[in-house]
Amino acid sequence: MPENLLAIDNGTQSVRALVFDPHGNLLYKSRVPIEPYYSTAPGLAEQDPEVFWKAVCEACQNLWAQGVDKSSIAAVSLTTQRSTLINVDKDGKPLRPAIHWLDQRRTEGVKPLGGLWGAAFKLAGASETVAYLQAEAEGNWLQKHQPEIWAATHKYLFLSGYLTFRLVGKFVDSVGCQVGYVPFDYKKQTWEASWGWKWQAVPMDKALLPELVPVASRLGEITPGAADVTGLPAGLPLIAAAADKATEVLGAGCLEAHIGCLSYGTTATINTTHKKYIEVIPLIPPYPAAVPGQYSFEIQIYRGYWMVTWFKQEFGLREQGLAEAQGIEPEALFDDLVRTVPPGADGLVLQPYWSPGLVFPGPEARGAIIGFSDVTTRAHIYRAILEGLAYALREGAERTAKRSGEPVTELRVAGGGSQSEAAMQLTADVFGLPASRPHVYEASGLGAAIDAAVGIGVQPDFPTAIRQMTRVRDTFEPEAKVHERYDELYHGVYKQMYKRLQPLYQIMRKK
């Protein structure tokens, strides 16, 4: 009887097809790099949806070329980057390029909410937050700037819904993938009720949206047409997973509220999984978890580990050149760079809000570095970046704990940055908590495989699946004296920076 699980993970940089066994061991992996997006004007980020689909097909075909036995696979699941949107016609053909999640277009001058909702938000002091959401909503931009596309749209889909249609031939998507500016009720995990304020904020016909299926339920079966181009067996069940951050949390084994899952990716996040709906930040809902009916509390540092990439491009050419000459990964040399500077970077402290958030810390936010001295080097700046991100995520963890009543007592760290031992030790020291890495780097793919395993009955339930399919690879324990130094800088400097700089940020925001 087939027991292996195939997870398709469409991330920002690549598409991976991953085969796991029922114990969470990664048996086969195929990775197809993709160009994340192209830009035709400043701030725009788009991509041909066919790029994603072709990469899915190629990644699957590469598995069969490796000798994967198709008959061993019990089910397939899909996880994707969040908030990438695609307009399609009644045949599922894209009407325009996908609007990528990194796109920064905004729609100014959207009509504010009126009536009782408008009055309620004004009374609550939340009008600016709602206006921000309206300006950020891609649907509002399309209706204003490309009304002919909007009028021709049969379905308005996230990337997950588009790829699901290509695989099973139905306009259906997982509840766990609904993260973005659409009229979705995050508490009830279904489309907003007809009287809800989100239909005013982002007006659209409900018929434009796909049917929603709970996590770990069947979305459909692989069609003969999809089987021809992917090599997946026709009739293989596609089981609903969740968006990539949520499946990463699950794959890292973070099913309990006291375990914080840090994701050191393009967007750095801290997530905890809860059974109760709580808005850690007012009007910013917890996202659907990769477990049915549960919630993922998330604090984001937008473009978090992008800052590491930025540093390497701007200041790390020496290490990259040496690594290429020595035939080693450049990360090892960057870890050595971090270790040349003491914890606390000789007083250099960085605030990592180089792209503002909605209300955390605030739409006016900017990045800042203070504490330069005559000993400061590029190594200090690199260490300050890593420390600043850890400080910001610690602040997020404390905010979540205050609202939920569930303190974080241990950490799992996933994403590209987790491969740095220096970053792992630094994280443990800043938080004063043990920080562990999952046993596989492909944590988001494993989370999707866990959803498939429970959905198809290979595992009886999620607690059992977590015990059977997840474990830690290694753990970094905090060093008491180093944590004491970080605690001093965190409370005495880092947490004071934003409120002191905020008035200046507000002046800078005025153009």
Image: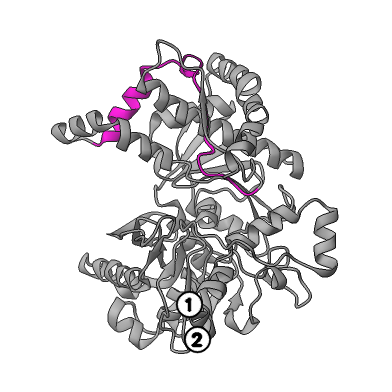
User: Which residues fall within the magenta stretch?
Assistant: 329-358
Callout 1 amino acid: Asn
Residue drawn at point x = 23 percent, y = 28 percent: 318
Q: Position of residue 451 (x, y in %)?
A: 52, 64
Earlier along the polypeptide chain: callout 1 or callout 2?
1
Q: Position of residue 425 (x, y in %)?
A: 46, 27
Q: Of helix, strand and loop, which one carries label 2?
A: helix
User: Taking 482 as reference, is 176 above or below it?
Assistant: below
From where the camera sits, is residue 276 visible? no
Q: Badge 1 is on which residue?
A: 87
- Residue 277: which quarter of the image? bottom right
Residue drawn at point x = 36 percent, y = 34 percent: 311
Proximity of marks 1 and 2: CB atoms separated by less than 8 Å: yes
Callout 2 amino acid: Ala
423 lies left or right of 478: left
131 lies left or right of 102: right
Q: Position of residue 84 (x, y in %)?
A: 48, 65
User: Taking 58 as reference, is 151 above or below it?
Assistant: below
Residue 25 or residue 150, whichever sits in front? 150
Residue 172 or residue 437, whichever sits in front? 172
**The furthest residue to the front:** 511
User: Taking 100 as reference, is 314 above or below it?
Assistant: above
Q: Quadrant of the C terminus?
A: top right
**The furthest residue to the top:** 374
From where the camera sits, is residue 103 visible? yes
Q: Badge 2 is on which residue?
A: 152
Front of the two marks 1 and 2: 2
Q: Of helix, strand and loop, which one carries label 1?
A: strand
- Residue 61: which quarter of the image? bottom left
Residue drawn at point x = 36 percent, y = 84 percent: 234
